[in-house]
Amino acid sequence: MKFSHKLFLLATDVILILGSLLLALVIRFSSSIPEKYLHHEMIPYFSLCAFSAGILWLFGLYNKLWRYASINEGLYLFNAVTVSFGVFAIPVFFTHGSFYPRSVTIIAWLLALFLLGSVRLLLRVASSGFVVPTGRKRVAIIGSGDPVESVIRSLKTNRSSYWPVGILDNEGKHKNVKIHGVPILGDRSDLPEVIRERGIQEVIVTEHSPTVFKEVLNLCKGLNVEFKTIPGVHEFMDGKVKLSPIREIRFEDLLGRDEIQISLESVRSYLYGKKVLVTGAGGSIGSELCRQIVKFKPEQLILLGHGENSIYEISLELSAKGSSSLFPLIADIRDQEQMRRIFSKTKPSILFHAAAHKHVPFMEMQPFEAILNNFLSTTFLAKLSSEFSLDKFIFLSTDKAIQPSSIMGATKRLCEMYLRAFSLKFPSTQFISVRFGNVLDSRGSVIPTFRKQIAMGGPVTVTHPEMTRYFMTIPEAVQLVLQAAAMGKGGEIFLLDMGRPINIMELANQMIRLAGYEPDKEIPITLIGPRPGEKLTEKLISDDEIKEPTSYEKIHSIRSKGVSLEELEKAIEEIKDAGKNDNEKALNGIISRFIPEFLNRLN
């Protein structure tokens, strides 16, 4: 509060205290005040005012922002006024009311409390305001109970850019009831009418329910509003949310996925006190693996990646959070001599192999690059892991490995086959593959692509109206990978529960509406056709595989007939020869011996 404002409020209080004394005299003498109390004995009144001003100042009443006043501030005011009148009551009572009648002291004290308290109440009401302040967005709040009350209180007291205009609760039972001055205007079905009549610019949804999110999106079609929500409990627990109670509604809010619950003890049992190496540690999945692994206090976390910027960023982030056991490394997993030196120097016990080329169309143009980076490098890392007696080798696979129409998917399927076969020959290290689909917001995925296109005003490019994909969030995928690794004994292929497939056209429409626009009217959607190597739909298991349950309901085990390690080793040498001659036809033939459906992509 500015000094001038403090003086103004202090002067107001002094006037009110003097007024309370005069009003007390009026009440005491029924408007017939003896002349001596008005002309001859005014010094005690002014003395009380001066004394009270000092007491109020000493109690710090002018260092408080009264628009945020609560019960505590009210107690400060009560104590200050009581002390002021209490001290002056002493001579009044001992002199038998020669200054002014003793009853006036009590009446004036009550009046002063009322008047000074009323001024501060008016300050708070005025700051809450009945008129929307300029520059603040008019918002409607969806929900009921404590979350709604908390959001409204925060928006009004923290001077946010939002101004709550109305509430729409679950059933509209409390219509016209107000919460902090904001009226309940009905239930969710009334939202379109409220938006039009009240000039709503944004809608804040306080319920973390995919059903509610989707209902609100559908209700607001064509109404040109933006959407926000409040963080879920897990976001506060993870330390992701610090100050603002409002964030954008994200596509993952619409997925309808249950929150992941992993066995922390089983994960801790194989990570605590161990040296853990993560390849591709700067990538979307790799960096999240690192974030979650450090929570289990490994002896050392080795962050290996080919891009120095991404490794620098994740190591800096983890260091800022107090992680001291980090060992960042810039290396190429294809460099066998370098990788051998790294294994010899760091002596890891656990390897999470997340490094891979993942961009399907790019790899179609460079098939031998995909084979070298994704498959041949993985086979060498497996041999190193066995040679250096690692406890576990966890390979991150993809649903694109099933009936692959791309070289990228084929390389992942070959890795699964090789690690299973290698595990039978060298069981001292547990080789585990974990297969899952697309992860939201990973680099190169459709979500950030759509987001950028929407920000640029479109068009949003969709390959085919019937294209579908399985999606899960990055933290969800990583938690299940950690859990699967705890369950694995060697040679398994685990499949994560991906939920239902999402139509990409539906995804584009929902993301455009989440941004506050109307699809095809304000943001166009353009069909561009499938890119090289892309399929309309992805499968999670092939025709010759059997999905079996495990002790964890969101993780399944895949059983299929294996391939001998000798056959695969022979194929590796043939692949190397094909690479030397840049013979893509020979490469396709070698791959099709193990994955017959791979050649169907060429027809």
Image (spheres, rainbow, N blue to C red):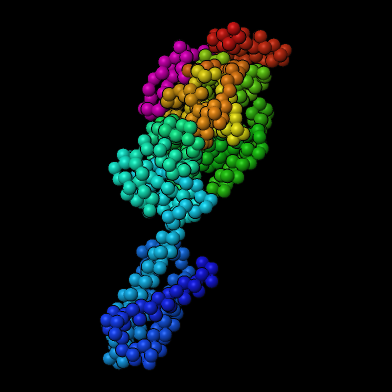
Picture residue at 43% right of the left edge, 75% below the top: 13
Residue at image location 40% in from the left, 68% down from the top = 119
Tell me if residue 68 can be seen: no
Q: Residue furthest top?
A: 603
In the displayed structure, 446 sits above or below 24; it is above
Circle count: 0
Q: Quadrant of residue 101?
A: bottom left
Which residue, as the protein is rendered here, is positioned at the far front?
32
Point out residue 258 in the picture as x, y percentages from the top left corner: 39, 33
Residue 444 is covered by the magenta coloring:
no
Query: Which quarter of the rendering shows the C terminus?
Result: top right
Please name the predominant secondary structure of the magenta segment in the image.
loop
Whether 554 is among the magenta residues is yes
Q: In the displayed structure, does residue 401 sit left or right of residue 190?
A: right
- The answer to whether residue 224 is above or below residue 134 is above
Which of the 4 quarters of the picture holds residue 188?
A: top left
Which residues are the magenta region? 540-564
- Front residue of 494/362: it is 362
Q: Nearer the viewer, residue 208 or 352?
A: 208
